[in-house]
Amino acid sequence: MAEINYVTKEGFEKLHKELHEMKYVQRPFISKQIADARDKGDLSENAEYHAAKEDQGLLETKIAQLEDLITKTRIIDESKLDTSKVMMLSKVRVLNHTTKKEMIYTLVNEKEADLKLGKISFKSPIGIGLMGKKLGDICEVTVPAGVLKFEILEISL
């Protein structure tokens, strides 16, 4: 059974936008490069033609992979999420006991993760450590730098 890829509505739209860009902008551009290179004559020694054909093959592979991913993708219905415990799409305010600093993380799919925006993958070490925890719980998370202790201060959407 294929693994389901859960994303936000925003993440789903981003996947479709990326696919549209590949199919309707990049694909025609590469086709034009191939046609231009073909017009230059002998294809056996035409480096531009071979490079464009290789680019086309790579793009078609990426398109197929993205289409496959989209078929396995499901949008999470935020109205059905429970804020009594940490789960996908939870916004979690935690206290790092080591640094005594508060941080806010939103747990998202790997493709939507962006640490600058406070979005971490629910499959990352911190995400795994926080999943399923409740308000007031203290969890220990093993990261490459060592073990971190987080106290769950708030869970929201």
Image: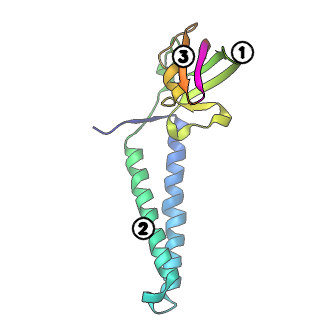
Residue 153 covered by magenta stretch: no
Instruction: Give amino acid for label 1.
Output: Lys
Answer yes or no: is residue 157 visible.
Answer: no
Q: Spatial distance from mark 1 to mark 3, Cα to Cα?
A: 15 Å
Instruction: Give amino acid for label 2.
Output: Gly
Per the image, the residue denoted by label 1 is 100
SS type, badge 2: helix
SS type, badge 3: strand
Residue at coordinates 52% horizontally, 36% vertically from top-left?
9
Eye-nearest disc, 3 or 2:
3
Q: Spatial distance from mark 2 to mark 1, Cα to Cα?
A: 51 Å
Q: Spatial distance from mark 3 to mark 2, Cα to Cα?
A: 45 Å
Instruction: Give amino acid for label 3.
Output: Glu
Instruction: Please state, as top left, top right, bottom left or bottom right, where the C terminus lies in the image.
Output: top right
Q: Give neighbour class at mark 1: few <14, some 14-19, many 20+ (Cα, 10 Å).
A: few
Give above or below for 32 relative to 80: below
Which numbered tag is attached to residue 140? 3
Give the magenta range. Answer: 145-151
Per the image, the residue denoted by label 2 is 57
Q: Give neighbour class at mark 2: few <14, some 14-19, many 20+ (Cα, 10 Å).
A: few
Residue contact between numbered discs 1 and 3, judged by CB atoms under 8 Å: no
Q: Position of residue 149 (x, y in %)?
A: 60, 15
Q: Which colour scheme is used?
A: rainbow
Q: Give neighbour class at mark 3: few <14, some 14-19, many 20+ (Cα, 10 Å).
A: some
